[in-house]
Image (tube, rainbow, N blue to C red):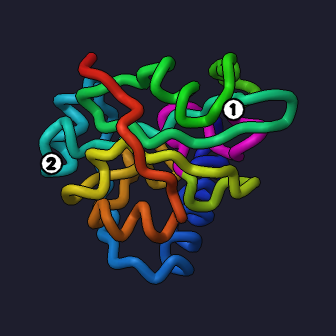
């Protein structure tokens, strides 16, 4: 990914955040190698970092799942919520193709397609930090405002890592 790709991703994400009209604060930091380092750089605890996971339901049918940093998707819970028997995660190239973002920068804000969003039930309970479209860029937002702006389905869809 080039610097132009990164700055374009950040521009799209920030423009979409601004259009959502929710209050947010952009944080920027250098490279990090762990969830703990990212949390420290963003001034939030690891559970407050929200991972945006792209999930495939079928051919050209994707959704975003917002997962607290200290948790992972519970596939049985997510399948039950969505009423499907099979889900998968696309490879990195497909995820980039359907969102416009590389892994580690993915956010529903500014995605090439407005896929449905499922947020774990812990997301709206606190302040969170979600990807900002480029490495080392994040948006700190109120979790309840986040799920409202994304019209997210909120459900317990995770388990501890």
**Residue in the picture at 57% in, 53% down:** 108
Number of dots carrying numbers: 2
- Name which of mark 2 and mark 1 comes first in the sequence: 2
Q: Is residue 122 above or below residue 54?
A: below
Residue 132 - label: none
Looking at the rendered structure, the secondary structure element under dot 2 is: loop
The residue where tag 2 is placed is 44
Residue at 64% of width from left, 41% of height from top? 63
Q: Is residue 7 above or below residue 119?
A: below
| Residue 113 image offset from top left, x and y in percent | 75, 54
| Above or below for 89 versus 97 | above
Q: Is residue 39 magenta?
A: no
- Residue drawn at x 86%, y 29% as measured from the top left: 59
Q: Quadrant of the N terminus?
A: top right
Residue 95, numbered label: 1
State the quadrant of the C terminus: top left
Q: CA distance from mark 2 to mark 1?
A: 27 Å
| Residue 141 falls in image quadrant | bottom left
Mark 1 residue element = helix
Q: Residues within 10 Å of mark 1 (few under 14, many from 20)?
A: many
Residue 111: quadrant of the picture: bottom right
Residue 105: x and y, percent? Answer: 51, 41
Q: Residue 64: x and y, percent?
A: 57, 42
Q: Is residue 14 left or right of residue 31?
A: right
Start and end of the magenta stretch? 95-107
Residue drawn at (73%, 25%), measured in percent from left and top? Answer: 93
Label 2 CA crowd tier, 10 Å (few <14, some 14–19, many 20+): some
Q: Is residue 96 magenta?
A: yes
In this rendering, would 160 be left or right of 19? left
* Label 2 with label 1: CB-CB less than 8 Å: no
125, 76: nearer the viewer? 76
């Amino acid at each position: 990914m080039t610097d132009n790709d990164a700055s374009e991703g950040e521009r799209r994400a920030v423009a979409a955040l601004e259009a959502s009209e929710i209050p947010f604060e952009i944080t920027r930091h250098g490279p990090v190698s762990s969830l703990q380092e990212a949390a420290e750089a963003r001034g939030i605890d690891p559970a407050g970092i929200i991972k945006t996971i792209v999930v495939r339901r079928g051919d050209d049918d994707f959704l975003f799942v917002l997962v607290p940093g200290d948790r992972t998707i519970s596939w049985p819970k997510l399948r039950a919520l969505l009423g499907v028997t099979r889900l998968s995660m696309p490879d990195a190239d497909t995820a980039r193709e359907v969102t416009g973002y590389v892994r580690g920068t993915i956010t529903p804000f500014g995605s090439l397609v407005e896929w449905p969003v499922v947020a774990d039930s812990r997301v709206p309970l606190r302040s969170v930090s979600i990807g900002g479209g480029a490495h080392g860029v994040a948006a700190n937002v109120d979790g309840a405002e986040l799920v409202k702006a994304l019209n997210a389905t909120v459900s317990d869809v995770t388990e501890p890592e």
